[in-house]
Image (cartoon, rainbow, N blue to C red):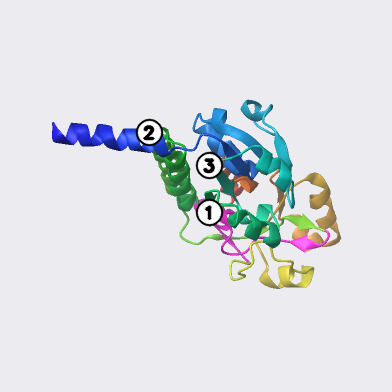
């Protein structure tokens, strides 16, 4: 009986501390809130691409790198969800001085993503929803790892952009997504999340596959005939948004890599 009442008291305490007016400063974090069934607590979001339907009417507080601080303050949030890259250093420092709780989320792996989903749910007073979603994501992650594991990983160059040429570093969550699919980022030794590289360094590392975002980027490789046949298009932008939906985007990525098993 004592355990029962302790559980009740803890649940009531969590509800009392739960955030009720949340501003999300990254599309991925906004998606996580919606995936937890808590879109009703969002009073402001930072825009960056298409929104989920559940968030269509939520007021905007700016765009990537262009946070409208006055607008944010007018919404009187009791919690700010922050991805560090969404705003500049000066505004990040300003946010820390506002005396408003800030939860910083920057997962470097898919396992970290599931942990942060659960932590955000706790902040919102939705622990059950967080545990359920995290469990589903971990199960899907385990399924993908088991299905696509390889004794010798496929060497892959993941191209973010071509003019100039950008890729992802070893600490970026997309590198972990590649490993789930039985591949290895040929630039996983670089520490920056999105390092700029040159064509010579790509040729030197001799990837077995080159992943690009659209047909135009694929066509640009035709000037290098020996590499052009290795290029595959991965148009799914879900890989760039570390929220619950990313696990299905990883599944689609694995389908591109799979024929080379």
Disc 2 or disc 1, which is closer to the eye? 2
Q: CA distance from mark 3 to mark 2?
A: 20 Å
Give the mark nearer the N terminus: 2 vs 1.
1
Who is closer to the viewer here, 19 or 221?
Answer: 19
Callout 3–callout 2 Cβ contact below 8 Å:
no
Q: CA distance from mark 2 to mark 1?
A: 21 Å
Question: Which residue is at the far right?
Answer: 223
Q: Residue at x 13, y 31 (%)?
A: 1
Q: Earlier in the sequence, mark 3 or mark 2?
A: 2
Circle on res. 128: 2
Percent position (x, y) of residue 46? Answer: 69, 42
Q: Is residue 236 depicted above or below 208 in this figure?
A: above
- Residue 24: which quarter of the image? top right
Quick check: 173 left or right of 94? left
Give me the residue at 46% from left, 60% from top. 151
Residue linked to disc 1:
107
Determine if residue 126 is in view: yes
What residue span does the magenta drawing correspond to? 163-186
Q: Residue at x 71, y 73 (%)?
A: 204
Please report contact status of discs 2 and 1: CB closer than 8 Å, yes or no. no
Q: Position of residue 58 (x, y in %)?
A: 67, 30
168 within the magenta span:
yes
Circle 1 Cα neighbour tier, 10 Å, few/some/many (<14 / 14–19 / ≥20): some
Sequence-wise first label, 1 or 3? 1
Q: State the SS at label 2.
A: helix
Q: Is residue 218 above or below residue 23?
A: below
């Amino acid at each position: 009986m004592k355990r029962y009442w302790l559980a009740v008291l803890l649940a009531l305490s969590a509800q009392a501390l739960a955030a009720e007016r949340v501003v999300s400063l990254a599309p991925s974090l906004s998606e996580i809130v919606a995936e937890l069934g808590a879109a009703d607590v969002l009073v402001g979001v930072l825009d960056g691409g298409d929104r989920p339907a559940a968030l269509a009417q939520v007021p905007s507080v700016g765009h990537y790198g262009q946070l409208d601080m006055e607008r944010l303050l007018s919404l009187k949030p009791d919690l700010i969800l922050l991805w560090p890259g969404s705003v500049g250093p000066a505004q990040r420092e300003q946010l820390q001085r506002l005396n408003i709780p800030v939860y910083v989320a920057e997962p470097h792996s898919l396992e970290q993503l599931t942990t942060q989903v659960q932590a955000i749910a706790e902040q919102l007073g939705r622990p059950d929803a967080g545990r359920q979603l995290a469990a589903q994501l971990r199960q899907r992650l385990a399924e993908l790892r088991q299905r696509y594991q390889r004794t010798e990983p496929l060497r892959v160059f993941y191209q973010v952009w071509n003019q100039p040429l950008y890729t992802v570093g070893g600490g970026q969550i997309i590198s972990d997504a590649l490993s789930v699919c039985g591949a290895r980022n040929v630039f996983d030794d670089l520490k920056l999340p999105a390092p700029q590289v040159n064509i010579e360094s790509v040729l030197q590392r001799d990837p077995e596959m080159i992943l690009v975002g659209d047909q135009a980027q694929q066509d640009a490789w035709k000037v290098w005939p020996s590499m052009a046949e290795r290029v595959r298009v991965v148009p799914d932008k879900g890989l760039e948004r570390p929220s619950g939906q990313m696990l299905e985007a990883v599944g689609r990525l694995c389908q591109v890599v799979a024929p080379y098993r």
